[in-house]
Amino acid sequence: MSEVCEITGLTEDNVAKLFYLHKQLTEGSEIPVPDEKSLIGFIKPLENTVSSNRIHDSEQKRKDSLLKHLEKSIASKFEGAKLSPFGSAESGLSLKGGDFDLCLQIPNADEKKTIKRIGGMLRGQGMEKVQTITRAKVPIVKFIDPRSGLNVDISINNSLALYNTKLLSSYAKIDKRVKDLAIIVKHWALHRNVSDSVNGTLSSYAWSILVINHLQEQQVIPNLQSGENRTIIEIDGNEFDISVNEDASLAQPSQQNIAELTMSFFRNYATKDWENEVISIRNGKPISRDEKGWMNENPTALDIYNSDKENPGRMGEHHLAIEDPFETDHDLCRVVRAEGELRIRNELLRAAELFGGGSTWKEICETVDADRLKGMEPVDIFHDLRDKNDDLVRNMLEKTKAEMDAVDRLIDALESERQSTLRMAKAMRGVIEETSDLRKEHKAIITGLKSRNKEIDEIKLKRDKINSDIILPIHMIEDELSKVYNRLTEELDIHRVPSLAKEKEQFSWFMELQAMHGKAREASELHHRFIELVKEQKEEIKKLKIYETKHDDATAKLLQDEPMLKDKNINSKEVGSYDRRVHNIQKALRKRRGEMHKLRREAGRLDAWLRKKSGNQNRGRGRGKGNRRGQKPRDKKEDSGPMTLGDISGLLSGMGNESSSKRSRKVSSKKAGMRKMGNLGAHRGSRSQFKKKE
Ligand code: UTP
Ligand code: MG
């Protein structure tokens, strides 16, 4: 078993991991101060960090375009909803390629349900890695937009975040050093892996608050939350003071340069009396724990970190206490876990020591766990071209252009097939609609024939049944009735009086004849109805034939206008099959257009590389003046460093796009605008353009 430090309780391995913190806790070591010369030496690299994080126009455009798209496709679906950007993209304190925070404000929404619904909508739009987090204080949906490559967080009714973004952006406007130091600190924190609230270190926002506090302490910026005029708002029954006093100013702001401020930032927090102080930019300087009422609770981070229990539980609260400027009950270190706290303190000490100990800025920011940042770093999109000669790249470009031509022809062919199939389906629908009245009548007659037939059968059955029960035809029944009646009612001949039995017999025969007569009359009526119906049926059949001829005539006339429908079965089933065909062609078109998009990008990349190379050669031969009009000379760093798609987009647009416009004319004049090779950014507009056309 390894040795354990008696003071810190850290094992040897952990002492190595937390070297600087351990040294401070055991030896209380002094942090060296850099001399003036080495401090000045930091200025250039720090400025480079700031400028390399400059947000390119194309990145801003991608954000604007995505926001528009989301407003249209999501926010508009919820009554009274508003989608607003916030966070670093809005305050200006963002690293290049930082995430895009959006807040959807919906009054009286069921937030969890809404987040889930939005998640579904985003998945339907082809957004990637859509993740809904409904258990957090503020429900959120995270996703990546594959078109712009942006990481997006949409939260619901996160109103305070909109106000604190506004506060940070007001600070950034006061003095350029706010933004510079925020970017420097965020860059360092990102690379040293201490800016990840999900994994137990401080949020990027908390680091921005620490920057503001430091600059307030250094007398660079005033306290913008000071002043008499107060603005109080109510959210969910709680009041918040969101006052921002844009007029606040310092009589004599400090003129320290960025190297001095960076150095003092690390020294300040490396040696901060965290035991007794709470960071509060609302107050303009740290406040005491007693005043704030936030105690440095047990167990400590070391207790938890050193515990050999399988589940040592949570450490006490408020160790690196940082008050949120508006939500003053919220301690921004609440997300920090034991190991995170120790690493943050170790890293602050490390940076402060290296700053004074002759290390470079690059060494101070040396990336920890580099894998974690894969995909975040700008990719060198020319990496595979760097060892190829220009002829080979030119060949690749020609090949790509040839492929573009082939795909373009395919797209044109699919497009015309789609058009003709659409026309066919439309024409068929037209014929069906035009003849629909005739078909309706025809159908009505057929329905009539069917029900009449049924009636005829029923009547016939009834009539025949009655007839089979009656032994005499109706006229004979009537004759017999009158005979029997006469016999029963004639004057009696006294000599020929019938016997009683005979008279009874006559009488019952009369009754029987009477009943028979009723039935016979019914059978006769049925028979007449039967004859009538058969006649009607014959008439209707004649009519049916007339409608059929009319329908055929009308169809033939319509077919004269649409000869392509000749010999085709025209019915709604057939129309459905044409609709399906259109759908399949559309699918194929989308696939081909995707291929075209990729090819266009590749051609743009190859073209940009060749231009970049020829630009370099011209400059190398001292022909710097030979640059094309509008082409800014690029600095050395850009020539050798990795280039992003945004950079290429800028490069091409600055070069007048000469070859690309020629190419787009060749590919297809009608879609020239859309197919410009130089159009390399993420163009959401083109998606909706396709939609409209389809
Ligand atoms: P982020 O941590 O993403 O900060 O929180 P950021 O300033 O945008 O930094 P990067 O550039 O992405 O790394 C986004 C926003 O969420 C709110 C703040 O408005 C912050 O700007 N937020 C974050 C809070 O209100 N409270 C928190 O504890 C964290
Ligand atoms: Mg952010």
Image (spheres, rainbow, N blue to C red):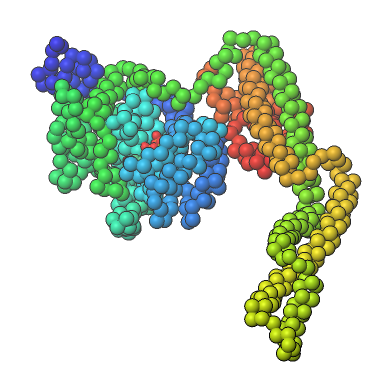
Residue 676 % position (x, y)? 69, 31
- Circle count: 0
Q: Is residue 141 visible?
A: yes
Residue 238 lies in quadrant? bottom left
Instruction: Farthest residue to the left: give it.
Output: 6
* Nearer the observer, 421 or 636: 421
Q: Is 220 drawn above or below residue 645 in the view shown?
A: below
Q: Is 281 drawn above or below residue 299 in the view shown?
A: below
Residue 641 % position (x, y)? 52, 19
Residue 374 % position (x, y)? 44, 22
* Nearer the observer, 568 or 456: 456
**Direction from residue 235 to residue 32 in the image, left or right:** left
Q: Is residue 361 visible?
A: no
Residue shown at 50%/49% (left/top)? 75
* Nearer the observer, 136 or 497: 497
Q: Is 73 drawn above or below residue 204 in the view shown?
A: below
**Direction from residue 23 to residue 599 in the image, left or right:** right
Quadrant of image for the N terminus: top left
**Direction from residue 584 to residue 169 in the image, left or right:** left
Residue 228 % position (x, y)? 30, 58
Residue shown at 42%/36% (left/top)? 131
Residue 579 lies in quadrant? top right
Residue shown at 77%/66% (left/top)? 527
